[in-house]
Amino acid sequence: MQDQSKYLEFIHAHVLISGKVQGVGYRFSTLNTAVSLGINGWVKNLPDGRVEAVFEGREEVVKKMINWCYQGPKPAVVQNVLVRYEQVEGIEGFEIHRIP
């Protein structure tokens, strides 16, 4: 059984990023940034040109990650970041999801 107590201080942010965010290394930069901050979750491209991500971790670290999303990697041109806070799922690690 997983120790759920470590998730009590965590928050879960579901994030949609729009603009020129595909074909510019956004997902890989998100992965590298999230791993360096110790954030759990995932990131993927959407068919409509947006990037979708989920971040779980301590509030201050997740907010740092969300702030990073407004800029992203150098070639990105972010137009909008939509954040919705949801219930923590207890995600372990961080990965890139691929569209089937």
Image: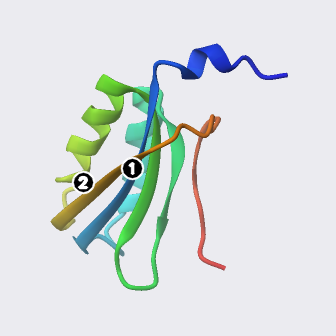
Q: On the rendered image, what quadrant is the C terminus found in?
A: bottom right
| Residue at 47% across, 33% down | 39
Mark 2: few/some/many CA within 10 Å (<14, 14-19, 20+): many
Q: Which mark is residue 30?
A: 1
Rendered position, 40 above or below 8: below
SS assignment at label 1: helix
Residue at the image point whose x is 51% and y is 41% from the top: 87
Q: Position of residue 19 (x, y in %)?
A: 21, 74
Q: Is residue 29 visible?
A: yes
When the figure is inspected, residue 1 is found, relative to residue 97, above or below; the finding is above
Q: Which residue is mark 2?
A: 72
Q: Amino acid at mark 1?
A: Thr
Q: Find residue 61 and report its horizontal and vertical position in percent.
A: 34, 27
Q: Is residue 11 above or below residue 25?
A: above
The residue furthest bottom is: 48
27 and 75: which one is in front? Answer: 27
